[in-house]
Image (tube, grey):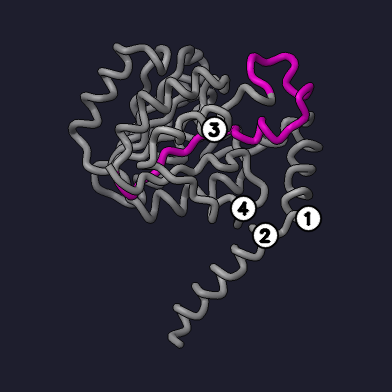
Amino acid sequence: MDPIDKFNKEKIDNINQLGESHELKKIAIDFIEKTTPNQYSYNFSWMGRPIIAFPQDMIAMQELIWKIKPDLIIETGIAHGGSIVYYASLLELIGKDGLVVGIDIDIRKHNRDLIEKHPMMKRIQMIEGSSTDPEIIKKISRIVDTKKTVMVCLDSNHTHNHVLEELKSYSPFVTIGSYCVVFDTIIENMPKNMFSNRSWSKGNNPMTAIHEYLKTHPEFKIDKTIQNKLLITVAPNGYLEKIKS
């Protein structure tokens, strides 16, 4: 067997075994639960901007972006801008005319100023407003019309209703073979009282929205190979591959 084929086969076998291990899945969920009070995901940055994400998920995003080579990445939720800077830097390495569009209902001035001064700003466009506002969606649609390969990342308000509306509005922009990635589905696997100060919780979160959406949208499938190899991820069942129109 060709050594590259052999390596890839071994990798697939390893990922499948990881995905079948209930013990490892429990350890991963316990890790996330135990580190959440100390805001584990807040402790990492990319090119100087806080990314507020698990490094494991960002490696998965790098793999997907390199494989798909989108010329447009749409992300709802900007916060400190680390993720849009990260995606923009990957598009810069790929070359061509890739663009990241970030949408946030409140782009705080101190964050906007630092993002606008960043070297990767040349591949970033920020839009302030609700991601579910019809006017915002029309604006995004006009940008989509100028691009060929589109990826979507949903990471704003994590309530069931909001994420479901985002899925209805943004998943149609995703091109076949690309992904709609829905972050923070892990909320469904956490204790119910963990998010008592938030508007989302167990039973009302991105994962419940995904399950509702997929009932009537067979054009997407959950790519479980990603969560199986990561184990530690905030997006279990959240990597949605568009397999048909």
Between disc 4 and disc 1, whose residue precedes?
1
Residue 240 in picture, x, y percent from top left: 45, 42
The residue under label 4 is 230
* Drawn side of residue 214 relative to residue 227, left or right: left
Inspect the image, locate mark 2, and give the three-letter code of the amino acid beneath it. Glu
Residue 38 in picture, x, y percent from top left: 78, 31
The residue under label 2 is 20
Question: Does the CB distance between marks 3 and 2 fall below 8 Å?
Answer: no
Q: Is 122 above or below relative to 198? A: below
- Quadrant location of residue 194? top right
Question: Does the CB distance between marks 4 and 1 fall below 8 Å?
Answer: no
The residue under label 3 is 49
The residue under label 1 is 23
As helix, strand or loop, the secondary structure at mark 2 comes to loop
- Quadrant location of residue 51? top right
Inspect the image, locate mark 4, and give the three-letter code of the amino acid beneath it. Leu
Magenta-drawn stretch contains 168: no
Dot 1, crowdedness within 10 Å: few (<14), some or many (≥20)? few
Region of the chain picked out in magenta, as a range: 176-201
Magenta-drawn stretch contains 200: yes
**Residue at 45% across, 78% down:** 5
